[in-house]
Amino acid sequence: MVTFKVEGKEYELPEVMSIDNYCKVFKIKDLLSDEYFAAKLVSIISGAPVEKLMEGDYDQLNYLAAYILGLLPKETPPFVDRFEIDGIKYGFFPNWRDMTYAEFVDMDTISTRPVDEMLNMLHVLAAVMYRPIVSEEGQHDFQIEKYDVKTMTKRAELFKKKLNVRYVLGAQSFFLLLEKRFLVYSQLSSIPKMNIWTKMKLVWKLKKIILKVALKRPSDGMSSQTELLQMILASTITSTTKQ
């Protein structure tokens, strides 16, 4: 953890970029060309007064600002299915095929909001995706707490302050890869107005059929898996577009 003093008072910068701080930095990203950007950035993260920072050492201020920017993910973080905060282990829902309707609706509601609104709810999205591990057989073989809105809300506030934003960004990329995996074969990709979560909702509704088709071995006299998948999803295009 990096610490510094301003007029005798000590301030500190975190070791990781929390969801809360990530949102704060993202909201001032358009000020990168502002000559006072470094002071504003350090102030937002540390709480140190902007005017006092501007009166301080130029090189020190630039170092602190560079340190903060260095905490931001430079590219899409890898997906991580578990982590620990304050001694409690949290895991990503282990089997997306068993995702409940309530889970999916809450995630869909958040992820289809305008960017600014969605940014303010990243901690909620994380709390839906990651829950306390209640039993485990191995590092990646575990069961998590049943989804409950009440406990999710409390967990969201904890994640907002303490969870490294890399986890939620990595989990989002998981769904993007999932969407590409199942929809690359379909004509749905030709519908520009259908966003990723609309597509994911459709895949969720058809998951049993899709999995059955995906796991079926092609045989003589039978359409290929790709052709069957195209037929199943293409048949829903008209009704989905109308909705």
Image (spheres, rainbow, N blue to C red):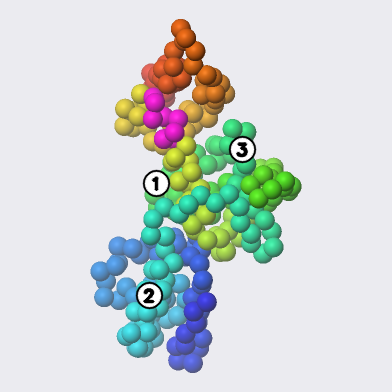
Residue toward you, 221 or 202: 221
Residue 109 in the image: x percent, y percent?
Answer: 49, 40
Residue 118 in the image: x percent, y percent?
Answer: 45, 49
Q: Which residue is drawn at 54% across and 23% down?
A: 215
The three-letter code of the residue at mark 1 reads Pro
Q: Is mark 3 on a helix, strand or loop?
A: loop
Q: Residue 40: in sight, yes or no?
A: no
Q: Which residue lies furthest to the bottom in this view?
A: 8
Q: In the image, which is nearer the foreground, mark 2 or mark 1?
A: 2
Location of residue 43 (image quadrant): bottom left
Please say whether residue 43 is one of the residues in the magenta stretch: no
Residue 173 in the image: x percent, y percent?
Answer: 45, 46
Location of residue 52 (image quadrant): bottom left
Residue 65, labelled with which disc?
A: 2
From what the image shows, is residue 155 above or below residue 39? above
Q: Distance between the residues labelled 3 and 1?
A: 28 Å
Residue toward you, 135 or 150: 135
Q: Distance between the residues labelled 2 and 1?
A: 28 Å
Residue under pointer 1: 114
